[in-house]
Image (cartoon, rainbow, N blue to C red):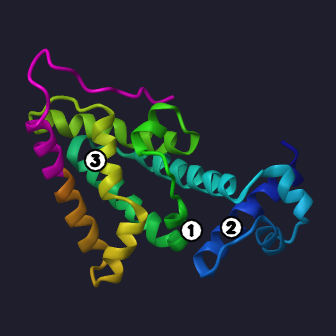
Amino acid sequence: MRSDTERNRRQLIKAAARLFEDSPTQVSLADIAKQAEVSTATAYRHFSSVEEILHAFRSQVGSELCEFSARQTTTGLVKLEAVSRFWVSLVLEHGGAMAQMRSHRGYLERLREGTGYLAPQAEALAEPLRQTAEELGLADLGDEALYLWNTLFDPRDILDLIKSGRNEDEAATRLVAALRGALIGWSAATDPPGGGSAHRIVPG
């Protein structure tokens, strides 16, 4: 990709994040182009919709999470907690833009169809979740473990928890503890032997 093309793309993603952080009203592609100081036509050459820019932004944040996860030298629950805490910090850093990712389709449906912006996040978490289940003496829950993590670590709910009076450390500590309990509870309610198995997404 040409340097000016890549620069325009980065500017549009950053502009969208800033606008969704600060704007109480609906944001258009023209608004984002103006904020990025490029023409609306240029914006449309890169993205067909505001939703597509948000997907690119979420993919970018997911890549940060994935890179952080890859740098960790720990395993299992310790690594899962570190990655989850980093995610909370990313949500607080990017604020309102992280809370804009709504979809009428469920998480598992999108994950299993290979929705692009979910892939880096899944790659960051799949192995720590599998190792954590093993440490806890649980069966591998596959992508249902990712589903549980996503349910608890939804950016909207993290921001809501912070606004309710919890600080970042308190929020992360409670969410990780809740995830541990959710994994145990979910595993206890799984099908008996021969009654089915967890579906697994293989990252990459």
| 192, 14: nearer the viewer | 192
Residue numbers of the magenta segment: 180-204
Question: For the N terminus, which image quadrant?
Answer: top right
Q: Is residue 193 magenta?
A: yes
Residue 49 occupies quadrant: bottom right
- The residue under the point 54% across, 48% down is 63
Tell me how far mark 3 sits from mark 1, CA to CA.
22 Å
Q: Amino acid at mark 1?
A: Ala
Which SS does the magenta portion mostly show?
loop
124 w.r.t. 52: above or below:
above
- The residue under the point 20% across, 20% down is 196
Q: Which residue is mark 2?
A: 16
**Disc 1 vs disc 2: Cβ atoms closer than 8 Å?**
yes
Q: Which residue is mark 3?
A: 148
Q: Amino acid at mark 3?
A: Leu
Q: Is residue 33 magenta?
A: no
Q: Which residue is mark 1?
A: 97
Tell me how far mark 1 sits from mark 2, CA to CA.
8 Å
Q: Amino acid at mark 2?
A: Ala
Tell me how far mark 2 sits from mark 3, CA to CA.
28 Å
Point out residue 120 in the picture as x, y percentages from the top left corner. Answer: 50, 42
State the count of labels: 3
- The residue under the point 55% across, 38% down is 115
**Disc 2 vs disc 3: Cβ atoms closer than 8 Å?**
no
Point out residue 22 in the picture as x, y percentages from the top left corner. Answer: 61, 81
